[in-house]
Structure formats: structure tokens, C-alpha cells
Amino acid sequence: MAITFAKLKEEPVEGNETAVVREPTTGLVTAFLNVLDEAKDSEGNFPTGMFLGLRSLVTLFDNGQFFLGSLINYLNEVDNETWEYSVSLKDSPRQILEALSAEYVLRVVEYYTDQIPHSQTIKLNEAIDKVWPSKESKGNE
């Protein structure tokens, strides 16, 4: 008997010919939840925008590359004193997320959410909801 694997869902991002969002693997979801857990404050809350920003970054691929990894490398190239880490794009998205501290990931998410226009955030969340539905994203549109 052959073992078969289900193909992860994928959805194009409206307005961007090279970007898609992909359903995260179980391992990536676990790494995502671990980052959120580590980023919580003493009251059990994580910073505003962290959930949706990180959700976008763990599902977004551009030209077949994991966007979070590409963004980390870009930031390191333009200012390696502020953004001291780079990653191997040969690593899986889960490995990339697990290799970084939650604090560093939070800084990258903040940079990303400050740069992306609100209209693009809406389009991105609509695509993500098709591959990884979330009550939180529907409430923030």
C-alpha cells in the first residue's frame, strides 16, 4: 500500500502575480503557536497585530520562496546592525520560525505590518481565510 500525502491548499493573492498563500503544515502551525505563546505579556496577551501579521508571514510565498525568510534576509542585507540574523531559504518555514526568538520574530512582524498597506492586508487575509480560516481575521477586516 502506498502512502499518499494531501497537497496543501494554495491561493493566489489578488493584485500580485507572484504571491500565493499556502496552508501551513502541522509543524509550522505548532511553531506559529509557540511564537505567539512566547510573545505574550504577563496578562497573557500578545502585542496588537502580532496574530494577523505572523499569520500572514507564515502563509505567504513569493516566487516560490517563503516570504518571512526572504524578508529576514532582506532586512539583514540593508541594515545588519539592526537586523542581525539571516536564514537559509533551503530550510523549511518551520525551521526558520523555530530558529529565531519570539522577540526577533515580533520585530520582523512589526516592520512588516508597518510597511504593508491596509488594502493589501485585506486582500491577503481574504486569500489566507481560504486556506487557513480564522475567526480573528474576520473580526479585523
Image: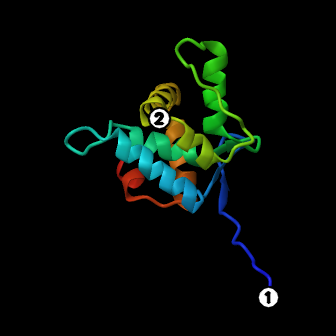
**Residue 97 image point, x, y percent:** 55, 42
Q: Earlier in the sequence, mark 2 or mark 1?
A: 1
**Residue 36 image point, x, y percent:** 39, 45
Alpha carbon separation for disc pair 2 and 1: 41 Å
Q: Which residue is mark 1?
A: 1
Judge the density around disc 2: few (<14), some (14-19), many (≥20) Cα neighbours within 10 Å: few
Secondary structure type for disc 2: loop
Image side of residue 15 versus residue 27, left or right: right
Marking on residue 114: none
Please tell me which residue is depicted at 76% across the width and 45% down the height of the picture. Answer: 64
Please tell me which residue is depicted at 60% across the width and 14% down the height of the picture. Answer: 80
Picture quadrant of residue 79:
top right
Furthest-bottom residue in view?
1
Furthest-front residue in view?
99
- The answer to whether any part of residue 123 appears in the image is no
Image side of residue 11 versus residue 38, left or right: right
Which quarter of the rendered picture does the N terminus lie within?
Answer: bottom right
Picture quadrant of residue 42:
top left
Q: Which residue is mark 2?
A: 101
Secondary structure type for disc 1: loop
Q: Amino acid at mark 2?
A: Ser
Please tell me which residue is depicted at 62% across the width and 20% down the height of the picture. Answer: 76
Please tell me which residue is depicted at 36% across the width and 39% down the height of the picture. Answer: 39
How is the rendered protein coloured?
Answer: rainbow
Q: Amino acid at mark 1?
A: Met
Image side of residue 39 versus residue 114, left or right: left
Vertical arrangement, residue 117 with respect to residue 40, above or below: above
Picture quadrant of residue 52:
top left
Vertical arrangement, residue 39 with respect to residue 79, above or below: below
Vertical arrangement, residue 73 with respect to residue 102, above or below: above
Please state which of residues 3 and 9 is positioned toward the viewer in this rendering: 3
